[in-house]
């Protein structure tokens, strides 16, 4: 009796965590991401406490005499084309690169899931209106679309976020719609309808939980893409404005100096790569952990 | 036959069609039927006779398009189900009328624990209950169908087919429905489990005084579980009566044929006598009696007009001109 009580009380979150823990790679990915989040949060706190002193003196202060200096004891990642410490810039950039990518994708996932499930579930005219609109968005290259949106709304962090989020909505809507279409004709959906479940309940408790797998993979990949898109916008002068550090803009502005100093491109590139890798392995692990059918 | 005389559901002249681009499928043609509270009505027919369409019409779950309820009325507890709004209908589904589906393997949500799935239906119809009360109700339903409540947090794939069907029964009965529609509840199970599941359904429905519409093509199941029997052929009820009316005094040639096609324990028969021919194409039904093309007694009258239903006793009605002749002669 006692054991059954304990087992009953285990919530879905606890159950998922128990399964997630077994996947060491995913766990490593999560640790990397948590570290990055902590770094980002601590830089925000440091800025607040020191009134941007460190930011002004170490992150954006230029020292042209030492430009492009390679890694050394004083500057383990070396200095960039304006003589700024790359390590400091990398650390201060985490908040923009990681948070903006994540927030943008979170936004477009929410919008995409809602639009996609409505389109897939109701079908017919609703489906046509929503999906044709998505097709229009999809027909415009996402970079061009984001550029246009930022140009129209004006350059600011929020507008960049909105632009990136909008350009990723169609991919999510399509993914969700496809899985809704395969799931909505299954018998358990009909059984749910026969027990008096409303459309809302059917979509959110029966269809969406069953279409989680492609969605999680899509979002983790999406964050990676969004980080690159933000970098691209920054490169065009529409994203994050210099001298604010951001991995993507650091990477793109360093391109012209790749022959003089390899480190200034490699370090931000590695930063992006590791973050994306961590996101992907964690996404994979999460997908497996959330699927009770794979439970052992 | 412990039945009260109170009427629970009455179906009048129900006609349902599936309208596709190529043809109109006449799934149900002028079906009339009633059930009393607490009784079990067996609905028997071949594949494609319209059994499932009838069940879904009651719950208004005909896939539409292409399905259309052309005419007819369904009165349940005095309400005309076909005139209710979708919201009112939703309040009835799973609450006062619930349904057990054919295949337990696919009728449960694979990513929701069975306890939660029972709670779902309780929650959908009893918003005022607290979470703890709902959970208690769900656990007691599980115990009632013979599954230890400690397994409530497990997922459908961890249960066997028979146990899944029990979970589905628990879901169907969780809100104490007055009518349970069981659409071939045992077809997907093996024979030993079939008997167990049916015994359980019958025991529970007697305990809860639930009426049951048992859809099946197994006459053995009907004989063991039903009070009355309706025989459906090509979307029409061709014979309707009590268990003894149908099994002891089958009148319609089709019913006789059905009973002749099951082996008897008492008679020595070298070969079973199946009914020759096939059920007519539901997109192109014969104008007269639907069974006429296969009937050895068919006359020109049968082929010209659909025979009316003849009441040959208080409980027994038959849609065949021969029955009329019998009444007149006897």
Image (tube, helix red, strand yellow):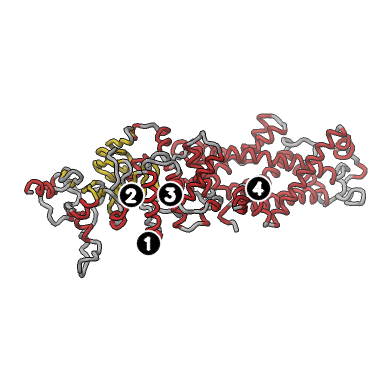
- Of all chains, the one bearing label 2 is B
Q: Position of residue B325 (x, y in %)?
A: 9, 48
- Mark 2 lies on residue: B214
Q: Alpha carbon of mark 1 to alpha carbon of mark 3: how far?
A: 18 Å
Left or right: B272 as drawn, with respect to B225: left
Q: Nearer the viewer, mark 4 or mark 1?
A: 1
Residue at image location 28% in from the left, 52% down from the top? B44
- Mark 4 lies on residue: A220
- Of all chains, the one bearing label 4 is A
Disc 3 element:
helix
Q: Earlier in the sequence, mark 3 or mark 2?
A: 3
CB under 8 Å between discs 3 and 2: no
- Mark 1 lies on residue: B191
Q: Nearer the viewer, mark 4 or mark 3?
A: 3
Q: Earlier in the sequence, mark 1 or mark 3?
A: 3
Disc 1 element:
helix
Q: Position of residue B319 (x, y in %)?
A: 18, 46
């Amino acid at each position: 009796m006692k054991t059954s009580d304990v087992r009953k009380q285990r919530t879905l979150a606890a159950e998922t965590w128990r399964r997630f823990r077994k996947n060491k790679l995913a766990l490593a990915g999560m640790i990397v991401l948590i570290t990055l989040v902590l770094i980002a949060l601590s830089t925000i706190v440091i800025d607040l406490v020191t009134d941007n002193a460190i930011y002004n003196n170490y992150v954006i202060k230029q020292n042209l005499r030492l430009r492009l200096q390679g890694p050394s004891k004083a500057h383990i990642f070396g200095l960039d084309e304006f003589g700024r410490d790359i390590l400091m810039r990398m650390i201060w950039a985490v908040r923009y690169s990681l948070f903006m990518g994540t927030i943008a994708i979170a936004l477009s996932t929410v919008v995409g899931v809602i639009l996609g499930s409505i389109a897939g579930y109701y079908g017919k005219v609703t489906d046509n209106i929503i999906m044709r609109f998505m097709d229009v968005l999809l027909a415009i290259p996402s970079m061009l679309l984001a550029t246009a949106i930022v140009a129209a709304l004006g350059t600011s962090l929020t507008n960049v976020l909105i632009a990136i989020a909008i350009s990723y909505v169609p991919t999510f809507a399509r993914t969700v719609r496809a899985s809704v279409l395969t799931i909505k004709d299954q018998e358990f959906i009909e059984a749910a309808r026969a027990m008096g479940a409303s459309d809302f309940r059917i979509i959110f408790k029966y269809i969406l939980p069953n279409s989680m797998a492609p969605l999680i993979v899509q979002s983790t990949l999406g964050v990676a893409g969004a980080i690159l898109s933000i970098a691209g916008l920054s490169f065009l002068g529409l994203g994050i404005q210099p001298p604010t550090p951001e991995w993507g803009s650091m990477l793109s502005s360093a391109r012209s100096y790749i022959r003089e100093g390899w480190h200034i491109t490699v370090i931000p590139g590695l930063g992006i790569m590791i973050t994306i890798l961590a996101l992907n392995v964690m996404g994979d692990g999460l997908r497996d952990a959330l699927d009770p059918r794979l439970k052992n | 036959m412990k039945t009260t005389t109170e009427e629970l559901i009455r179906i009048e002249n129900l006609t349902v069609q599936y309208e596709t681009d190529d043809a109109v499928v006449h799934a149900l043609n002028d079906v009339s039927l009633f059930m009393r509270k607490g009784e079990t009505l067996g609905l028997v027919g071949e594949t494609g006779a319209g059994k499932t369409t009838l069940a879904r019409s009651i719950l208004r779950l005909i896939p539409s398009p292409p399905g259309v309820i052309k005419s007819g009325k369904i009165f349940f507890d005095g309400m005309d189900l076909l005139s209710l709004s979708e919201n009112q209908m939703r309040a009835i589904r799973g609450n006062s009328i619930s349904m057990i589906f054919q295949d337990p393997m696919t009728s449960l949500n694979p990513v929701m624990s069975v306890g939660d799935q029972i709670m779902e239906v309780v929650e959908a119809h009893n918003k005022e209950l607290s979470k703890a009360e709902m959970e208690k109700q769900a656990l007691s339903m599980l115990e009632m169908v013979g599954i230890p409540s400690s397994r409530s947090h497990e997922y459908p794939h961890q249960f066997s087919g028979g146990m899944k069907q029990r979970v589905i029964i628990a879901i169907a009965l969780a809100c104490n429905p007055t009518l349970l529609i069981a659409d071939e509840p045992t077809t997907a199970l093996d024979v030993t489990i079939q008997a167990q599941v049916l015994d359980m359904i019958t025991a529970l429905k007697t305990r809860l005084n639930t009426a049951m519409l048992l859809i099946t093509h197994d006459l053995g199941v009907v004989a063991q579980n039903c009070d009355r029997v309706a025989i459906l052929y090509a979307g029409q009820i061709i014979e309707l009566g009590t268990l003894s009316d149908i099994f002891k005094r089958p009148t319609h040639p089709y019913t006789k044929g059905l009973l002749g096609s099951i082996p008897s324990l008492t008679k020595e028969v070298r070969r079973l006598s199946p009914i020759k021919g096939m059920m007519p194409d539901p997109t192109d039904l014969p104008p007269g009696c639907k069974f006429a093309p296969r009937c050895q007694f068919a006359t020109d009258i049968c082929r010209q007009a659909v025979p009316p239903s003849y009441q040959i006793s208080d409980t027994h009605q038959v849609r065949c001109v021969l029955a009329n002749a019998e009444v007149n002669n006897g």
